[in-house]
Amino acid sequence: MPLETGARLTQPDEFYQALIDAHAGLDDEASAALNARLVLLLANQIGDLDTLREALAVARGASGRAPA
Amino acid sequence: MPSTYTPPVFAHVPAPELATGEQASRPVIIVGAGPVGLACALDLSLHGVPTLVLDDGDTVSAGSRAICYAKRTLEVLDRYGCGEAVVERGISWRIGKVFHRDRLAYSFNLLPEAGHRRPAFVNLQQYHLEEAMLARLQALGRAEVRWQNRVTGVVQDDEGVTATVETPEGVYEARGRYLIACDGARSPLRGLLGLDFVGQVFRDRFLIADVHMRGDFPTERWFWFDPPFHPGQSVLLHRQADDVWRIDFQLGWDADPEEERKPERVIPRIRAMLGDDRPFELEWVSVYTFQCRRLARFVHGRVIFAGDAAHQVSPFGARGANSGIQDADNLGWKLARVLAGASPASLLDSYERERTEAADENIRNSTRATDFITPKSRMSRMFRDAVLDLAVDHEFARRLVNSGRLSLPTTHRGSPLSTPDRDAFSGSMAPGAPAADAPVREGGCERWWLDLLGGEFCAVYFAASDAAQAAREVALLRDLLGGAGRVVAVGEHAPATVHDNAGLLRQRYDASPGTLYLLRPDQHVAARWRRWTDDDVAAALRRAQGVEHAA
């Protein structure tokens, strides 16, 4: 299944607040570790490798600055 | 002092009670002649209630205050009879653009749908709004506005409120059955009642500059995150009337507010933003911080709080003046009914319930915008920048960008005045929602739907296809509403008087032949049915009026 980047979140502001709240009180390293776990959980939810490869490519290319 | 505007100085007339020693007596005393106090006075005037408006100043608002009036607020002002003056004087806009660093991230259209009288927003300096409202208030002739009258004491009993009023010539007492405190974010009335006003303080400072210039920016809201001319911070540009532009620079918490408001600091910032040497003049400069907070309760016996005196939000989203005017819209008819003895005083509890709900919604939205604009941690900033990067190409991320969720009216879900749906409807006109506008025809003329609803209860009846049945049902509804309001029948033939020729009304209200909506005097939906009986309508009307069920 192709990567869907149209609007799918039913409550975008609520999601974003929950995401930021999840990081509250964590230092940078703990935050990065949380993100790593989150990415793995969501990847498993998606399941399909082609979709995940596409997401990885978009994420790698999207920065306004040169990819790190 | 703005070069484009000379504020009026209102003549101060010594209060006649100073000579007679009597109390000034009105059904309602309103403290504060800003947009919210004036809206309360207009609303009550239209319901035939005389008011005494006391303001400690002698002119309209000075400098940069509210500038964006939302569609719903304009519709309320239309009901008050001054919407057209505001829209004509102001700048209509609906396109917003969001820039990130040196590029456009995306643009949005707040009202992409045609068939509405009012635009998504009108920008206008607050002083122009107040002048339009004052002119209308004077034309209605039921309110008396007294300038340089400062309320310094409030005592209430079972019958009413007595206010101590200080004037340049001396002190007198004003007596009302109710007092509405619309005295702003620093509300002295709140202090007089000893009420806590707690919430969240944001550790950030913003520079507001109102600039007079011949700008060739389009009439759009432009918001920059981290632009090259103001790195690491945000900037907002908005057009107002008279070629005045509002520019809002985020400065950060460590900025020195005294230094930052000096022209030698402000002018280079603006120059960098403009990127050229076009001439401009500073009309107003201030540095502010903000808070999101509200009173726990808005109704304190016979003293009722509205507007910034009751709730305060950050400016992102234009939710201050808009929600204050919507407070007045909600309160006016309820207070008028209570004063007339038509509803019990407990109807005012629904003002508190509905408007604290609205305040919470506004605070939630404005807090989220503030958190997006001023990320509180490194990770929060990384997510913010990631969203902005992705927003250039991907629609889903645009929905996450939050430079202010612009003011929309609250749908009072679960209001005690609403009758829950029994029939299935789609669309947004649920009980508690404000009525949507649409173009219609009446008596052979093009009209706007909201103008036909009036300021009392309104039964909106989409006529049954059978003309005899429709006539019977219209007559029945007229009986049921009695003096409480009007019946508006929509259809192609008599007894219908309103022709939904574009079909937008049917669509926006998801109506079929026989559908009935009961609207409150503030044009919010109280109840709706596809099939209904006279008992349904009578019960819903009693409920919306806050009158206890007979059984």
Image (spheres, rainbow, N blue to C red):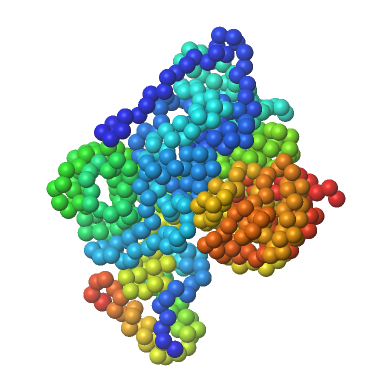
Residue at the extreme top: B19
Q: Is residue B209 left or right of residue B507?
A: left
User: Residue drawn 47% across and 52% down?
Assistant: B117
Given residues B130 and B196, the one toward you in this image is: B130
User: Residue drawn 79% across and 46% down?
Assistant: B548
Given residues B540 and B25, the one toward you in this image is: B540
Give coordinates of residue B405: x percent, y percent.
44, 57
The answer to whether residue B368 is seen in the rendering is: no
Quadrant location of the N terminus of chain A? Answer: bottom left
Give coordinates of residue B378: x percent, y percent.
35, 64
Give coordinates of residue B432: x percent, y percent.
62, 55
Location of residue B184 with respect to B151 vertically, above or below: below
Q: Is residue B359 left or right of residue B262?
A: right
Location of residue B148 with respect to B475 vertically, above or below: above
Quadrant location of the C terminus of chain A? Answer: bottom left
User: Residue drawn 75% across and 51% down?
Assistant: B475
Residue at the extreme bottom: A49
Location of residue B75 with respect to B8 vertically, above or below: below
User: Residue drawn 40% across and 48% down?
Assistant: B122
Q: Is residue B422 left or right of residue B99?
A: right
Given residues B510 and B219, the one toward you in this image is: B510
Q: Which quadrant would residue B209 be assigned to in this image?
A: top left
